[in-house]
Image (cartoon, helix red, strand yellow):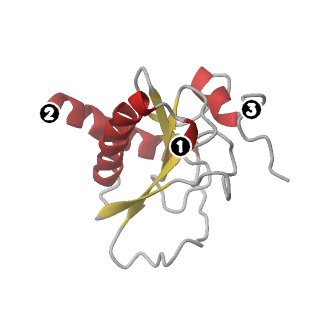
């Protein structure tokens, strides 16, 4: 039996977007909110979510997708530059393995030889909230720089 994944009731990401739950924000505009994953694959691992609740990508209106992916491109480049990485892994689940039933993309900073193989990986913790905020600020600064470059 399939869970009701479309419900906004008790949605952690809706709580974060609304400001009722704290997060290490790296970017926000009218449509999206980006923040550090609390259990990152690598430090700087960021989640990008639409502010409007969609259970998954299939539920998003077509006219919203272009703007969302433009923001995904911007935030991904900010993660890469802000973490001094060689690239990023961008991944999104629909229904299966979707721990929070709110559309979200994982943006994972990658370095050549980082040891990540396949899609099963260990998770890290930030040393403390100061380290977490330093990563959030670094990424946010790069996004701002990219926005003003155009």
**Residue at the spot 55% in from the left edge and 71% down from the top edge:** 119
Of helix, strand and loop, which one carries label 1?
helix
- Of residues 1 and 32, the one drawn nearer to the viewer in this rendering: 1
Q: Which picture quadrant has residue 134?
A: top left
- Point out residue 82 in the picture as x, y percentages from the top left corner: 32, 48
Question: For the residue carrying disc 2, how many other residues have a C-alpha within 10 Å: few (<14), some (14-19), or many (20+)?
Answer: few
- Of residues 149 and 129, the one drawn nearer to the viewer in this rendering: 149
Whether residue 42 is situated above or below residue 9 in the rendered picture = below
User: How many numbered circles does the render carry?
Assistant: 3
Cα separation, mark 2 vs mark 3, equals 39 Å
**Residue at the spot 58% in from the left edge and 71% down from the top edge:** 121
Is tag 1's residue or tag 3's residue first in the polypeptide sequence? Answer: 3
**Residue at the spot 56% in from the left edge and 48% down from the top edge:** 37
Label 1 or label 2, whichever lies nearer to me, is 1
- Point out residue 99 in the picture as x, y percentages from the top left corner: 70, 51
Cα separation, mark 1 vs mark 2, equals 29 Å
- Read off the residue under disc 1: 57
Is tag 2's residue or tag 3's residue first in the polypeptide sequence? Answer: 3
Cα separation, mark 1 vs mark 3, equals 15 Å
- Read off the residue under disc 2: 149
Is tag 1's residue or tag 2's residue first in the polypeptide sequence? Answer: 1
Question: For the residue carrying disc 3, how many other residues have a C-alpha within 10 Å: few (<14), some (14-19), or many (20+)?
Answer: few
Left or right of 119 on screen, residue 107: left
**Residue at the spot 61% in from the left edge and 21% down from the top edge:** 18
Marks 1/3 in contact by CB < 8 Å: the verdict is no
Q: Which mark is residue 7?
A: 3
Q: Which picture quadrant has residue 59?
A: top right
Q: Which mark is residue 108?
A: none
Of helix, strand and loop, which one carries label 3?
loop
């Amino acid at each position: 039996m399939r869970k009701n994944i479309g419900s906004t009731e008790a949605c952690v990401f809706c709580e974060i977007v609304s400001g009722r739950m704290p997060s290490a924000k790296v970017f926000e505009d009218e449509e999206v909110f980006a923040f550090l994953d609390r259990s990152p694959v690598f430090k700087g691992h960021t989640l990008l979510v639409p502010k409007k609740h969609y259970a998954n990508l299939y539920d998003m209106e077509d006219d919203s997708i272009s703007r969302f992916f433009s923001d995904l491109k911007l935030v991904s480049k900010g993660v890469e530059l802000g973490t001094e990485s060689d690239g990023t892994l961008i991944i999104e689940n629909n229904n299966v393995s979707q721990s929070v039933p709110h559309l979200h993309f994982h943006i994972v900073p990658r370095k050549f030889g980082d040891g990540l193989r396949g899609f099963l990986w260990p998770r890290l913790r930030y040393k403390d909230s100061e380290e977490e905020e330093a990563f959030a600020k670094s990424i946010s600064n790069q996004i701002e720089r990219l926005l003003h470059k155009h």
